[in-house]
Image (cartoon, rainbow, N blue to C red):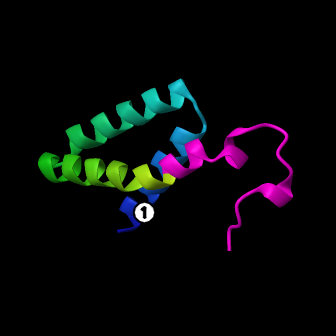
Amino acid sequence: MAGLAALYLFVVVIALTYSRGGVVAFVIAIAVATGLARARGHCVLLTVATCVAAVPALAFALTAHALTTDGVPVATAPATA
């Protein structure tokens, strides 16, 4: 379970960095990990499920005006509580 939580966080962080190199490194790392796994189908299934689970967080983060615009005052940022 800790591995899935780490993968979820990794997916969100890589997507929010807007880094093409990070995405390429992520895809290569997942391909190598899947290739080395004994249960490849299970590995692919969990990876896809984790990426799908990250979609709502990414949809919010990539469309929120206060998070995607430069110079937005902290007072107008969405509450985190």
Q: Quadrant of residue 19?
A: top right
Q: Which residues are magenta?
A: 58-81
Q: Which residue does the image show at 24% across and 42% down from the upper left?
A: 34
- Residue that label 1 marks: 5
Between residue 76 and residue 24, name the one nearer to us: 76
Looking at the rendered image, the quarter that the C terminus falls into is bottom right
Q: Which residue does the image show at 57% across and 43% down from the upper left?
A: 63
Dot 1 falls on a residue whose secondary structure is: helix
Tell me residue 59's x, y (percent).
49, 47
Tell me, yes or no, if residue 11 can be seen here: yes
Q: Amino acid at mark 1?
A: Ala
Is 31 covered by the magenta stretch? no
Is residue 51 placed above or below 77 in the rendered structure?
above
Tell me, yes or no, if residue 7 can be seen here: no
Left or right: 48, with 76 as reference point: left
Is residue 46 placed above or below 33 in the rendered structure?
below
